[in-house]
Image (cartoon, rainbow, N blue to C red):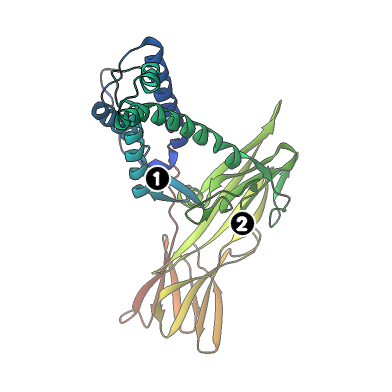
Amino acid sequence: APSLTASGRPAFVTPWWADIAIQGHALGLLTGIVLAGWLAQRRGSDLPGPGRLFVGASLVAVGQNLWAVYWFLGNGEYVLFRAVGLGLVALLAALVAAVGVDSGTTLSARLQTIRTDGGSPDGSRRSLVAPAALLVVVLVVAVVAGSAVPTNLVSVGDDELPGEPVEIRGYEVTYTENVQNGMVSVVDVGLFGLSTDVNSSGVIVRNPDRHVWTTAVSKGRLAFAGDRRIVVGGVGWRDEVGVSRRGFDAAGGPTAYRVTLTHDGDERLAYRSEPARAAPRVAGWNVSLVATDAPAGAGSAFRLNLTRDDRNLSVPLPTGNESVSAGGVRFVREDRAVIAVVGENGTATRVRVAAEERYRRAN
């Protein structure tokens, strides 16, 4: 088409640097350096000078984002070590530059000079800089490649998933929060006091027979979208599990929500959050939103709890344009908002205490 019309849309994104395969980029760059040094030796060619090699290596390393050294903290959180990454880039560039020292002389010629010329100690040491630097690069390649082995040796843990997961031909699907990630590392690798032993929150899919334990949808992504469909299957078959989150944001406070799973028309409660207390006090009452464990269609999924001194009251959260009253406070549902009303119509005080969560299903 000669023209294209586009518009913005909401999206759930993770940090861009968390999607960079730093180890793969570093391995490719270092392997290229080793091969370039070997090829130059075979051909008897000169390498560029140290200055040009330093600038070139720095530009390539920065272009490949090798400075973005990060670690996964669990629950969709990451930490970026920018200073460490920048230092590693500078060290790598200096190492590459050292390969070009005395670039006008081949490696065999340098060794021959050391054996027969009896040159000055400074000259001998200078002749060994490039071979030593190239050897260090080879060792770094081995370390980068070898470090992938312990970090990727994992097994599926034996711990059962909490609650009542949906079971489909050996697969288990559920929603939970702050549970230990079931992909247990055989070798616990640490970095700056951080470990590969992390917690996960979201929709978990588990199949011990197939060595599967994965967070299919993170807690944050489900909170953004509201609904997701989880597909499981094998050779010649597939099935789906629907996951839905519904909740209310307490004014000036956290969110109370429920997560349900649906499979073959059967809906079950998988998770409900802790009560969410609203910041405003209404007629001396503290107002909290409570997600209940009521089955679908068997009563209100949310309630309003009112506490003052040693008194406790509880009423269902109003739906539609209805209202409920407790402790001299009338709670009115207006579209997505829950309004607390105190007093008569003419002099009534109105305070918003909660609002229904909004979801962006376009993502």
Q: Position of residue 321 (x, y in %)?
A: 45, 64
Say which residue appears at 64% left-offset and 63% top-offset.
Answer: 294
Question: Residue 95 is drawn in which quadrant?
Answer: top left
Identify the residue position indicated by label 1 in the image. 15
Q: Alpha-carbon distance for marks 2 and 1?
A: 23 Å
Q: Is residue 116 above or below residue 138?
A: above
Say which residue appears at 46% left-offset and 84% top-offset.
Answer: 328
Crowd band around label 2 with a 10 angstrom C-alpha radius: few (<14), some (14–19), many (20+): some
**Can the viewer see residue 308 in this picture?**
yes
Left or right of residue 50, residue 226 in this image: right
Say which residue appears at 41% left-offset and 84% top-offset.
Answer: 283
* Relative depth, front residue between 323 and 242: 242
Crowd band around label 1 with a 10 angstrom C-alpha radius: few (<14), some (14–19), many (20+): few
Q: Position of residue 341 (x, y in %)?
A: 39, 77
Point out the tag, 2 or 1, that comes first from the N-terminus.
1
Q: Is residue 216 above or below residue 2?
A: below
Q: Is residue 5 above or below residue 196?
A: above
Q: Residue type at mark 1: give it.
A: Pro
Q: Residue type at mark 2: give it.
A: Val
Left or right of residue 326, residue 209 in this image: right
Q: Position of residue 168 (x, y in %)?
A: 73, 41
Which of the numbered marks, if any, corresponds to residue 65? none
Specify the quadrant that holds the C terminus. top left
Say which residue appears at 38% left-offset and 37% top-offset.
Answer: 66
Question: Residue 65 is drawn in which quadrant?
Answer: top left
**Can the viewer see residue 230 in this picture?**
no
Q: Is residue 125 above or below residue 241?
A: above
Which of the numbered marks, if any, corresponds to residue 179? 2
Q: Dot 1 lies on which element?
A: loop
Q: Dot 2 lies on which element?
A: strand
Q: Position of residue 188 (x, y in %)?
A: 60, 50
* Relative depth, front residue between 114 and 253: 114
